[in-house]
Image (spheres, helix red, strand yellow):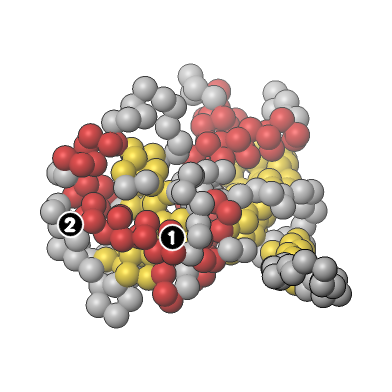
Amino acid sequence: MALTFIPTVWAARLLTALESSLVYGQREVVNRDYEGEIRQAGNTVKIASIGDVTIGEYTKDTDIDDPETLSDTDLSLVIDQAKYFNFYVDSVDRAQQNVNVLDEAMKRAAWKLREAADTFLSGVMEAAVPTGNKIGAVTPAEPTKDDAYEYLVDLGVLLDESDTPIDGRFVIVPAWFHGLLLKDERFVKAGTARSGNVLANGEVGEAAGFRILKSNRVPNDEGAEYKIIAGHRIATAYVEQVLDVQTFQPEKRFGDAVKGLHVYGAKAVRPTALACLIANKA
Protein backbone atom coordinates (compact mmCIF):
# COMPACT_ATOMS: atom_id res chain seq x y z
CA MET A 1 0.00 0.00 0.00
CA ALA A 2 1.36 3.40 -0.94
CA LEU A 3 2.25 5.83 1.79
CA THR A 4 -0.45 8.38 2.53
CA PHE A 5 1.43 11.65 2.65
CA ILE A 6 0.38 15.25 3.26
CA PRO A 7 3.35 17.51 2.42
CA THR A 8 2.27 20.51 4.49
CA VAL A 9 1.80 18.42 7.62
CA TRP A 10 5.21 16.76 7.33
CA ALA A 11 6.94 20.05 6.58
CA ALA A 12 5.48 21.62 9.71
CA ARG A 13 6.49 18.62 11.80
CA LEU A 14 10.08 18.82 10.64
CA LEU A 15 10.34 22.54 11.32
CA THR A 16 8.97 22.02 14.83
CA ALA A 17 11.52 19.31 15.50
CA LEU A 18 14.32 21.62 14.33
CA GLU A 19 13.24 24.54 16.47
CA SER A 20 12.75 22.39 19.54
CA SER A 21 16.32 21.11 19.40
CA LEU A 22 18.37 24.10 18.25
CA VAL A 23 20.68 25.76 20.77
CA TYR A 24 22.24 28.63 18.82
CA GLY A 25 19.14 28.90 16.66
CA GLN A 26 16.49 29.10 19.37
CA ARG A 27 14.47 32.26 19.91
CA GLU A 28 16.16 33.02 23.24
CA VAL A 29 19.54 33.29 21.47
CA VAL A 30 18.72 34.77 18.05
CA ASN A 31 15.83 36.90 16.88
CA ARG A 32 13.35 35.87 14.18
CA ASP A 33 12.05 39.40 13.63
CA TYR A 34 12.76 39.31 9.91
CA GLU A 35 11.57 35.80 9.22
CA GLY A 36 8.90 35.96 6.57
CA GLU A 37 8.05 33.94 3.53
CA ILE A 38 11.22 32.37 2.11
CA ARG A 39 10.69 31.11 -1.41
CA GLN A 40 14.15 29.87 -2.35
CA ALA A 41 17.75 29.80 -1.26
CA GLY A 42 19.47 33.01 -2.30
CA ASN A 43 16.64 35.33 -1.30
CA THR A 44 17.74 38.44 0.57
CA VAL A 45 16.06 40.09 3.54
CA LYS A 46 16.72 43.83 3.70
CA ILE A 47 16.99 45.21 7.23
CA ALA A 48 16.75 48.99 7.51
CA SER A 49 18.27 50.92 10.40
CA ILE A 50 18.09 54.57 11.43
CA GLY A 51 21.10 56.52 12.69
CA ASP A 52 21.26 58.28 16.05
CA VAL A 53 19.37 61.51 16.70
CA THR A 54 21.46 64.52 17.73
CA ILE A 55 20.61 66.10 21.08
CA GLY A 56 21.02 69.88 21.28
CA GLU A 57 21.25 72.38 24.12
CA TYR A 58 18.15 74.59 24.41
CA THR A 59 18.45 78.27 25.36
CA LYS A 60 15.37 80.29 26.21
CA ASP A 61 14.23 82.73 23.50
CA THR A 62 16.80 81.35 21.04
CA ASP A 63 16.06 79.60 17.78
CA ILE A 64 16.88 75.91 17.64
CA ASP A 65 18.76 74.33 14.73
CA ASP A 66 17.02 73.25 11.56
CA PRO A 67 15.69 69.66 11.64
CA GLU A 68 18.42 67.18 10.84
CA THR A 69 18.04 64.60 8.13
CA LEU A 70 18.30 61.17 9.63
CA SER A 71 20.69 58.77 7.96
CA ASP A 72 19.62 55.26 7.22
CA THR A 73 21.50 52.14 6.21
CA ASP A 74 20.52 48.73 4.93
CA LEU A 75 21.82 45.40 6.11
CA SER A 76 21.36 42.39 3.88
CA LEU A 77 20.51 39.02 5.39
CA VAL A 78 21.08 36.51 2.62
CA ILE A 79 19.37 33.13 2.64
CA ASP A 80 22.51 31.38 1.43
CA GLN A 81 22.34 28.03 3.20
CA ALA A 82 20.44 25.10 1.69
CA LYS A 83 20.56 21.60 3.14
CA TYR A 84 18.56 18.58 2.08
CA PHE A 85 17.79 15.01 3.12
CA ASN A 86 16.70 12.16 0.88
CA PHE A 87 16.00 8.71 2.32
CA TYR A 88 14.28 5.51 1.27
CA VAL A 89 12.35 2.89 3.26
CA ASP A 90 11.79 -0.52 1.68
CA SER A 91 8.25 -1.92 1.87
CA VAL A 92 9.55 -5.13 3.47
CA ASP A 93 11.35 -3.24 6.23
CA ARG A 94 8.33 -1.07 6.91
CA ALA A 95 6.03 -4.08 7.14
CA GLN A 96 8.31 -5.90 9.59
CA GLN A 97 8.79 -2.97 11.95
CA ASN A 98 6.59 -2.32 14.97
CA VAL A 99 7.52 1.34 14.96
CA ASN A 100 6.76 4.03 12.42
CA VAL A 101 10.00 3.90 10.43
CA LEU A 102 9.21 7.02 8.44
CA ASP A 103 8.41 9.03 11.55
CA GLU A 104 11.68 7.99 13.18
CA ALA A 105 13.61 8.76 10.01
CA MET A 106 12.09 12.24 9.89
CA LYS A 107 13.22 12.86 13.49
CA ARG A 108 16.75 11.79 12.62
CA ALA A 109 16.72 14.06 9.58
CA ALA A 110 15.72 16.94 11.86
CA TRP A 111 18.57 16.16 14.25
CA LYS A 112 21.14 16.23 11.48
CA LEU A 113 19.74 19.46 10.04
CA ARG A 114 19.89 20.92 13.53
CA GLU A 115 23.59 20.17 13.79
CA ALA A 116 24.26 21.86 10.45
CA ALA A 117 22.21 24.96 11.34
CA ASP A 118 23.72 25.33 14.81
CA THR A 119 27.26 24.97 13.45
CA PHE A 120 26.54 27.64 10.84
CA LEU A 121 25.03 30.03 13.40
CA SER A 122 27.87 29.63 15.87
CA GLY A 123 30.29 30.55 13.08
CA VAL A 124 28.30 33.66 12.15
CA MET A 125 28.27 34.83 15.77
CA GLU A 126 31.96 34.11 16.31
CA ALA A 127 33.00 36.04 13.21
CA ALA A 128 30.91 39.07 14.24
CA VAL A 129 32.27 39.58 17.78
CA PRO A 130 34.12 42.93 17.89
CA THR A 131 37.82 42.72 18.75
CA GLY A 132 37.28 44.74 21.92
CA ASN A 133 34.67 42.25 23.13
CA LYS A 134 37.04 39.27 23.13
CA ILE A 135 38.86 37.71 26.06
CA GLY A 136 41.84 35.48 25.31
CA ALA A 137 42.26 36.63 21.71
CA VAL A 138 46.07 36.81 21.98
CA THR A 139 46.63 33.99 24.46
CA PRO A 140 43.66 31.69 25.10
CA ALA A 141 42.46 31.55 28.67
CA GLU A 142 42.68 28.29 30.63
CA PRO A 143 39.72 28.36 33.03
CA THR A 144 39.73 26.25 36.17
CA LYS A 145 37.04 25.42 38.70
CA ASP A 146 38.28 28.40 40.72
CA ASP A 147 37.94 31.07 38.03
CA ALA A 148 35.48 29.78 35.36
CA TYR A 149 32.74 31.81 37.06
CA GLU A 150 34.98 34.89 37.05
CA TYR A 151 35.31 34.68 33.27
CA LEU A 152 31.52 34.83 33.00
CA VAL A 153 31.59 38.00 35.08
CA ASP A 154 34.20 39.47 32.74
CA LEU A 155 32.02 38.67 29.71
CA GLY A 156 29.14 40.42 31.45
CA VAL A 157 31.25 43.54 31.98
CA LEU A 158 32.09 43.68 28.25
CA LEU A 159 28.39 43.54 27.43
CA ASP A 160 27.63 46.19 30.06
CA GLU A 161 30.15 48.51 28.44
CA SER A 162 28.50 48.08 25.04
CA ASP A 163 25.02 48.89 26.43
CA THR A 164 23.67 45.38 25.86
CA PRO A 165 20.33 44.83 27.61
CA ILE A 166 20.75 43.01 30.91
CA ASP A 167 17.59 40.95 30.79
CA GLY A 168 17.80 37.99 28.43
CA ARG A 169 21.57 37.54 28.20
CA PHE A 170 22.93 34.10 27.35
CA VAL A 171 26.26 32.32 27.19
CA ILE A 172 26.83 29.02 25.37
CA VAL A 173 29.53 26.79 26.86
CA PRO A 174 31.05 23.41 26.01
CA ALA A 175 30.52 20.46 28.33
CA TRP A 176 33.95 20.76 29.97
CA PHE A 177 33.37 24.41 30.92
CA HIS A 178 29.99 23.51 32.39
CA GLY A 179 31.77 20.84 34.43
CA LEU A 180 34.03 23.50 35.91
CA LEU A 181 31.04 25.64 36.84
CA LEU A 182 29.43 22.70 38.62
CA LYS A 183 32.41 22.68 40.98
CA ASP A 184 31.80 26.30 41.96
CA GLU A 185 29.31 26.88 44.76
CA ARG A 186 28.28 30.24 43.27
CA PHE A 187 27.00 28.54 40.12
CA VAL A 188 25.42 25.65 41.98
CA LYS A 189 23.38 28.04 44.13
CA ALA A 190 22.41 30.39 41.28
CA GLY A 191 21.95 27.65 38.71
CA THR A 192 19.13 25.98 40.59
CA ALA A 193 16.96 29.10 40.63
CA ARG A 194 14.94 27.96 37.60
CA SER A 195 14.92 24.25 38.38
CA GLY A 196 11.13 24.29 38.68
CA ASN A 197 10.62 26.04 35.35
CA VAL A 198 10.69 24.80 31.78
CA LEU A 199 14.23 25.41 30.58
CA ALA A 200 15.22 26.35 27.03
CA ASN A 201 17.04 23.93 24.75
CA GLY A 202 20.44 23.11 26.22
CA GLU A 203 19.93 25.33 29.25
CA VAL A 204 21.71 24.12 32.36
CA GLY A 205 21.19 27.01 34.76
CA GLU A 206 21.85 30.67 35.46
CA ALA A 207 24.91 32.50 36.74
CA ALA A 208 26.59 35.92 36.62
CA GLY A 209 23.56 37.43 34.86
CA PHE A 210 23.50 34.82 32.08
CA ARG A 211 21.31 31.95 31.11
CA ILE A 212 23.87 29.17 30.71
CA LEU A 213 23.40 26.89 27.71
CA LYS A 214 25.51 23.86 26.85
CA SER A 215 26.29 22.73 23.33
CA ASN A 216 28.68 20.47 21.45
CA ARG A 217 28.63 22.98 18.59
CA VAL A 218 30.81 25.56 20.39
CA PRO A 219 33.37 26.61 17.73
CA ASN A 220 36.84 25.22 18.38
CA ASP A 221 40.05 24.31 16.62
CA GLU A 222 40.38 20.53 16.97
CA GLY A 223 39.64 20.56 20.68
CA ALA A 224 41.42 23.83 21.45
CA GLU A 225 40.58 27.55 21.45
CA TYR A 226 36.90 27.14 22.21
CA LYS A 227 34.94 30.27 21.33
CA ILE A 228 32.48 30.67 24.20
CA ILE A 229 29.96 33.21 22.96
CA ALA A 230 27.86 35.42 25.21
CA GLY A 231 25.31 37.99 24.19
CA HIS A 232 21.69 38.91 23.67
CA ARG A 233 19.16 37.84 21.06
CA ILE A 234 19.09 41.34 19.54
CA ALA A 235 22.59 40.71 18.17
CA THR A 236 21.79 38.07 15.56
CA ALA A 237 18.92 37.70 13.11
CA TYR A 238 18.08 34.22 11.84
CA VAL A 239 15.56 33.11 9.24
CA GLU A 240 14.76 29.58 8.18
CA GLN A 241 12.18 27.61 6.26
CA VAL A 242 11.56 24.00 5.44
CA LEU A 243 10.98 24.90 1.82
CA ASP A 244 9.75 21.61 0.44
CA VAL A 245 9.08 18.04 1.57
CA GLN A 246 8.11 15.42 -0.97
CA THR A 247 7.41 11.72 -1.02
CA PHE A 248 8.02 9.56 -4.04
CA GLN A 249 8.28 5.90 -5.01
CA PRO A 250 11.55 4.97 -6.74
CA GLU A 251 10.77 3.43 -10.10
CA LYS A 252 12.85 0.28 -9.57
CA ARG A 253 12.10 -0.31 -5.87
CA PHE A 254 9.17 -1.34 -3.67
CA GLY A 255 9.01 1.26 -0.97
CA ASP A 256 8.75 4.94 -0.27
CA ALA A 257 11.28 7.75 -0.29
CA VAL A 258 11.12 11.18 1.31
CA LYS A 259 13.21 14.24 0.51
CA GLY A 260 13.18 17.69 2.00
CA LEU A 261 14.91 21.05 1.66
CA HIS A 262 15.83 23.36 4.56
CA VAL A 263 17.01 26.89 3.72
CA TYR A 264 18.25 29.51 6.14
CA GLY A 265 20.51 32.48 6.70
CA ALA A 266 21.78 34.68 9.53
CA LYS A 267 23.22 38.13 10.06
CA ALA A 268 24.81 39.83 13.06
CA VAL A 269 22.75 43.03 13.10
CA ARG A 270 24.07 44.33 16.45
CA PRO A 271 27.51 42.74 16.87
CA THR A 272 28.35 44.89 19.91
CA ALA A 273 25.78 42.80 21.80
CA LEU A 274 28.11 39.80 21.49
CA ALA A 275 31.22 38.90 23.49
CA CYS A 276 33.54 35.91 23.33
CA LEU A 277 35.86 34.03 25.63
CA ILE A 278 38.54 32.07 23.77
CA ALA A 279 39.59 29.25 26.07
CA ASN A 280 41.51 25.99 26.22
CA LYS A 281 40.94 23.11 28.58
CA ALA A 282 43.23 23.52 31.58
Instruction: Report the front residue among 268 and 112.
Output: 268
Q: In the rendering, which numbered label is found on residue 147?
A: 2
Q: Earlier in the sequence, mark 1 or mark 2?
A: 2
Looking at the image, which residue is at 33% across and 76% down?
137
The C terminus: image quadrant:
bottom left
Instruction: Report the front residue among 196 and 101.
Output: 196
- Disc 2 residue type? Asp
In the image, taking residue 179 as reference, residue 100 lies left or right, namely right
Residue 257, image x and y in percent?
A: 65, 40
In the image, taking residue 144 as reference, residue 2 lies left or right, namely right
Looking at the image, which residue is at 60% across and 35% down?
16
Residue most toward the top?
98
The residue wearing badge 1 is: 159
- Disc 1 residue type? Leu
Residue 76, image x and y in percent?
A: 72, 68
Label 2 SS: loop
